[in-house]
Structures are given as C-alpha cells and as structure tokens.
Amino acid sequence: MLKTLKDGDIWLVAQPDHGLLAGYLAAHWGNARFQRPGGYAGVSDPERLRAETIFAVAQHDNGWWEWDAAPDLGDDGLPLGLAEVLKNQQAGMDRWRCGLSRFPRSPYVNLLLSGHAHWLYAISALPDPDPAFTHPLFWKGSPGKLYPGSREAPLQFIAELAELRAQWMETLRADPATAAWIDAESLQPHLRLLQVCDGLSLALCSA
C-alpha cells in the first residue's frame, strides 16, 4: 500500500492499482522520436511483444493482491505503508514468488517481472550491479532504507530467480515466434522501461 500525506489528506493507493497506472504509461510510451515497446529490435510480431510488455508492466506488483485485500494495520488504524511492509524481507520475497506463479502460460511476462525483482534486490545484494538497471527509487537514497536486512537471503532469492529465468528463456527460445524476444537488444530496453514506468507511477501515486 502506498501511503502518503498530501495537502493534509491521507492518500492510500493499492500496489496493484499503482501497477495498472505504470501499465497505462507503458501503453502510451513512444512517439515520433523514440520507439514504442516491442519495437526496439527486429522481431516478427512487434505488436504481440508490445502487448506482452504492457501487460507485464501493469501486473508487475500483482504479488501484492492478497496483502492489499487484507492489509496489516498500523497504530493509526490505517494500512501499513510500503516502507513499513518491506522491513519483512522474507515476506517481500514470498510476494514475488506468488506473483511469478500467477501467469504460468506467459513466460515473457514472468521474465520481465523476475528481471524487475532481480534488479530491485541486486542493488543491495550484489557487489557491482549494472547502474543501467538501477531503479529510480535508488537514484537518491540508500537501498538499505527500503530493503533492510542481511545479504544472504537476497542472494539466495537472486539465484532462485536465475533458475526460473533460464527456464522461461528456454521456452521462449524454443518457439520461432518468440526466440528473438530474449535477445539483449530487445529484452533489456523492456526491463528498463518497466523500471522507469514503475518509478513514474510511484511518483504520481505518492509524495
């Protein structure tokens, strides 16, 4: 739950709703000067890839559905805010596991979601994460404030994600219609787009 004070009012935005806004931004991304999703590299069906990407962006926080439907409450009687909830490191990873099991027939969607999760944890767990994939949340602040705890559990989770990603990539590679989707020149811009749309949506939905 995104929870913020704005002009004297409490704003509460459910994580899945924030995700839908991110998907709306992705659906309107692109113009005469830069590409829409699906068009970053030569694929046989860019519109299908665009639709899969937009859906992934819109559903990137679907693992929060159950929590936001019955949220834990704080001392103020309101749902806990995002930063408060993320203090429970293991519960956060379990939400990702739940979200990644939601769409078993959509390997590309899961590939983008798991990539998003990877880079959220990599910033604090890996010794030299690629700055190109740094989430906007961390452009000014320390990852430790949002993801407190030891590095051991995130490293294990990153390894778990790597195994799942390898399986989804193998499935996509085996289909001539989707094999090019996992090429770096196509996949990486979509991962970065998810990060940016997520960051923009968070800014619009909170302080």
Image (cartoon, rainbow, N blue to C red):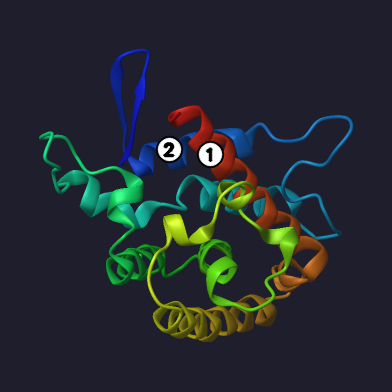
Q: Is residue 14 above or below residue 92?
A: above
Label 1 SS: helix
Pick the residue in front: 164 or 174: 164
Q: Is residue 30 above or below residue 134?
A: above
**What percent of the width, then of the height, locates residue 2?**
35, 38
Q: Please report the residue visible at 15 percent of the width from the left and 42 percent of the height from the top.
A: 74
Q: Please report the residue visible at 28 percent of the width from the left and 64 percent of the height from the top.
A: 88
Specify the label residue 22 is tagged with: 1
Count the labels in the image: 2
Residue 154 picture quarter: bottom left
Q: Please report the residue visible at 11 percent of the width from the left and 40 percent of the height from the top.
A: 75
**What percent of the width, then of the height, locates residue 146?**
43, 55
- Does residue 107 appear in the picture of this structure? no
**What percent of the width, then of the height, locates residue 130?**
72, 68
Q: Please report the residue visible at 41 percent of the width from the left and 52 percent of the height from the top.
A: 61
Pointers 1 and 2 in contact (CB under 8 A)?
A: yes
Q: Which residue is mark 2?
A: 18
Q: Is residue 143 above or below residue 74?
A: below
As measured in the structure, the alpha-carbon distance from the residue carrying label 1 to the one carrying label 2 is 6 Å
**What percent of the width, then of the height, locates residue 186?**
77, 61
Label 2 SS: helix
